[in-house]
Image (tube, helix red, strand yellow):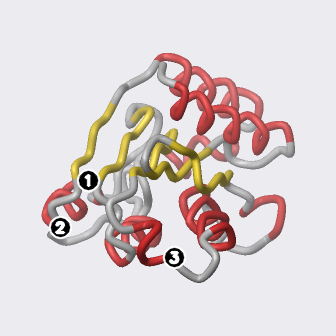
């Protein structure tokens, strides 16, 4: 696992320690982490506090008014495939590449195809540490397993 995915995993572990979904993300520009985030929906009750959104917000705070310049061409590392909302933000801000830790523990909403159609490179690692992190969470909180793995989960029509 490279240093950037390791940083995203650390964010996911922080979320899990707060009893939140174990999803973490970092935004990388020119080999430097410029934004960090973790899913905080359960902690805050705010449904927009997904890991990727939090990492983009953090990068924007650090951008000194140059957020479009900072994010355009950047890479997002995230422990799970981004949802529709997060994929929309990735597309909107011109992020060029998304590196995904794993896609085995939940049902994808179709966002890999959506991002690829916008010429965003999507690399999926299927990293055992990312998979195990979610499996451990789902064992500790089985009520979330059904939601994350539901085949009836909303899916994009592409």
Q: Residue at left 61%, top 56%?
A: 35
Left or right relative to 53: residue 10: right
Task: Please name the residue shown 61% across and 45% down the image.
Answer: 23
Q: Are marks 2 and 1 in contact (CB under 8 Å)?
A: no
Asked if the residue under mark 3 is in contact with the one under mark 1, i.e. CB atoms within 8 Å, the reply is no
Left or right, 137 with respect to 32, comes to right
Quadrant of the rendered structure where residue 140 is?
A: top right
Mark 3 lies on a secondary structure that is helix
Q: In the rendering, which numbered label is found on residue 49?
A: none
Would you place residue 61 above or below residue 123 in this image? below
Q: How many marks?
A: 3
Q: Which residue corresponds to mark 1?
A: 112
Q: Mark 3 to mark 2: distance in Å?
A: 20 Å
Q: Which residue is mark 2?
A: 118
Which quadrant, please, contains the C terminus? bottom left
User: Which sits earlier in the primary sequence, circle 2 or circle 1?
Assistant: 1
Is residue 152 or residue 127 the one in the foreground?
127
Decide: is 39 above or below 48.
above
Q: Is residue 137 visible from the viewing direction of this image?
A: yes
Spatial separation of the CA atoms under disc 1 and disc 3: 24 Å
- Mark 1 / mark 3, whichever is N-terminal: 3
- Closer to us: mark 1 or mark 3? 3
Label of residue 67 in the image: 3
The percent coordinates of residue 109 (x first, y second) are: 34, 58
Residue 39 picture quarter? bottom right
């Amino acid at each position: 696992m490279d240093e950037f995915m390791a940083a995203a995993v650390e964010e996911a572990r922080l979320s899990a320690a707060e009893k939140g979904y174990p999803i973490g993300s970092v935004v990388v520009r020119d080999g430097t982490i410029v934004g960090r985030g973790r899913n905080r929906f359960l902690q805050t009750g705010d449904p927009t506090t997904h890991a990727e959104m939090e990492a983009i917000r953090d990068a924007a705070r650090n951008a000194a008014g140059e957020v479009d310049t900072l994010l355009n061409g950047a890479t997002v590392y995230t422990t799970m495939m981004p949802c529709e909302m997060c994929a929309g933000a990735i597309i909107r801000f011109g992020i060029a590449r998304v590196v995904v830790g794993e896609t085995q523990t939940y049902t994808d909403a179709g966002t890999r195809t959506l991002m690829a159609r916008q010429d965003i490179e999507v690399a999926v690692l299927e990293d055992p540490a990312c998979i195990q992190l979610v499996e451990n969470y789902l064992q500790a909180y089985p009520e979330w397993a059904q939601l994350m793995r539901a085949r009836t989960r909303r899916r994009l029509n592409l």
